[in-house]
Amino acid sequence: MAVDVLVIGGGNAALCAALMAREAGASVLLLEASPREWRGGNTQHTRNLRCMHDAPQDVLIDAYSEEEYWQDLLKVTGGLTDEKLARLVIRASSDCRTWMRRHGVRFQPPLSGALHVARTNAFFMGGGKALVNAYYRSAEALGIEVLYDTPVDAIELDDGRFVAARSGARRFAAHACVLAAGGFESNREWLREAWGQDARGDWPADNFLIRGTRFNMGVLLKAMMASGADMIGDPSQSHCVAIDARAPLYDGGICTRIDCVSLGIVMNRDARRFYDEGEDFWPKRYAIWGRLVAQQAGQIAYSIIDAKAIGRFMPPVFPGTRADTLAELAGKLGLCESTFQETVSAYNAACQAGRFDHTILDDCHTSGVTPAKTHWARPIDTPPYTGYALRPGITFTYLGLKVDARAAVHFGGRPSENLFVAGEMMAGNVLGKGYTAGVGMSIGTAFGRIAGTEAAAAKAARHRPDGTGTRLPTPLEATT
Ligand SMILES: Cc1cc2nc3c(=O)[nH]c(=O)nc-3n(C[C@H](O)[C@H](O)[C@H](O)COP(=O)(O)OP(=O)(O)OC[C@H]3O[C@@H](n4cnc5c(N)ncnc54)[C@H](O)[C@@H]3O)c2cc1C
């Protein structure tokens, strides 16, 4: 017998959808590609979600208005965002935590040294792994069936209506379906194709590291594209961070991120600076540095700091390369010593006296050097010096399925009546490019909840004698 709602994926968006559908009275089956011990996709690596609030709320200080959140999003995406859907996500972020708590998620204030986000982001106690475990526990208690080791490889459709999903020889029919199987960031071939070859003849994606799960291969994105679903986003756009070049190929997670960029300078393999390291607060800029490194020769760069920066950022898991002189550091990093010295000297000479304050956009800037460093510019002159080699670390891709406010998958502009999508698979509707910390979980939570509710309602509607039924309330309308 067909289940009411089939959810494909096993991360935040899938779990939110499954829990909402079950709460609406539907029977739910969730298919997760990974084995149980690797369940939770990229969500297991997360730490927080960005929340709008008009006044202090438990772990969140001050206020973060809808307008400020929207302006932040507008700025990082350069306008490549759908305002209606973005505002829906923003508003949903203001009260979703009550529902999350009901399913066992706990919050805590950020640890000192985390990004400057005590005002904007609610941190999960125990991180994303604890969130994932809490949701699975709640799902099991509510009678949601979960099948691990079940990668879906095909979707059967009938004129835009979901009929069944297949995993090898197994077939899963359902009245409605939610796709929440992540982006295609784990698929190195597809990344290679999307990024192509650069002017130097390099294939930049060959040097990318994948920060999260190895299971987000984009199989369903490809399948839906082939079925004529409406797509949104550019396949080469993604959340891409500069991470420690020694990080593992998959699942390095948060501890391989290098967060001292704004405290020092960054050079490419020719020992030349190439971008303003102090352009804006790190949480608003960290997600552009992966792409910047990807554009450099050999897709490698080096973050250089001196002793003044130590203790002002979260140290990564691997110790940096240390040296007592700049010449020694250049040698240890394999960079041309004379160019290295020249770059540091030019930068040091350009630093203007100011009042250093890393918590504000301070007045320490350079003058007469290109590129400029517009904030937190202090000479690199106090040993010991530290360097970290950086590689692009891809977090998630933005190519996705086009949706409306009901999270419906569209075919030729027409919404499917029983096929919905949430999370990374549709994040590109809100994130055309760029990123601001914590918005991935806001998108997945808002649209996961909507998709689950709509999937349960689609089934209910189909089973009314006139086929119309009464729409179930969306999560925004429902009491939390
Ligand atoms: C290191 C790291 C840190 C991050 N930190 C944050 C953070 O603090 N805050 C934030 O907002 N965002 C963060 N993100 C981004 C965040 O992970 C995503 O926005 C969010 O978790 C995506 O949720 P999702 O459910 O769409 O995808 P995922 O959590 O990746 O889940 C996708 C699921 O689909 C499964 N799957 C894939 N293909 C198939 C298939 N064919 N059949 C069945 N199942 C399939 C996968 O196994 C996986 O379980 C981080 C990402 C990484 C990698």
Image (spheres, rainbow, N blue to C red):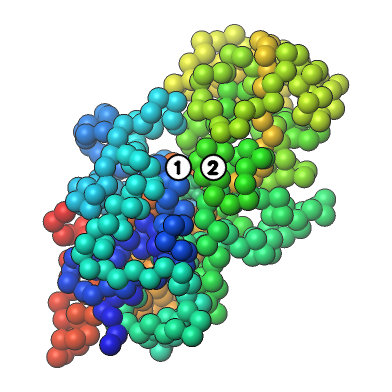
Vertical position of residue 50 compared to residue 180: above or below: above
Foreground residue among 246 and 230 = 246
Residue 479, image quadrant: bottom left
- Rendered-image quadrant of the N terminus: bottom left
Vertical position of residue 448 compared to residue 258: above or below: below
Q: Note whether ligand 1 is within 8 Å of mark 1.
A: no
Q: Secondary structure at mark 2?
A: helix
Where residue 11 appears, as percent x and y from the top left, is 40, 58
Give the crowd class for mark 1: few <14, some 14-19, many >=20 residues within 10 Å.
many
Q: Note whether ligand 1 is within 8 Å of mark 2.
A: no
Where residue 333 appears, as percent x and y from the top left, is 77, 29
Q: Is residue 442 visible?
A: no
Task: Return the disc, 2 or 1, that comes first in the chain's sequence.
Answer: 2
Give the crowd class for mark 2: few <14, some 14-19, many >=20 residues within 10 Å.
many
Residue 413, image quadrant: bottom left
Q: Quadrant of ligand 1?
A: bottom left
Where residue 359 appears, as percent x and y from the top left, is 44, 21
Looking at the image, do the residues carrying marks 2 and 1 touch, with CB atoms under 8 Å apart?
Answer: yes
- Rendered-image quadrant of the C terminus: bottom left
Residue 287, numbered label: 2
Three-letter amino acid code at disc 1?
Answer: Thr
Question: Looking at the image, which residue is at 51% across and 81% down?
Answer: 168
Residue 436, numbered label: 1
Calculate the distance from the C-alpha at mark 2 to the C-alpha at mark 1: 8 Å
Q: Secondary structure at mark 1?
A: loop
Foreground residue among 300 and 232 = 300
Three-letter amino acid code at disc 2?
Answer: Ala
Residue 413, numbered label: none
- Report whether 225 appears left or right of 88: right
Vertical position of residue 379 compared to residue 469: above or below: above
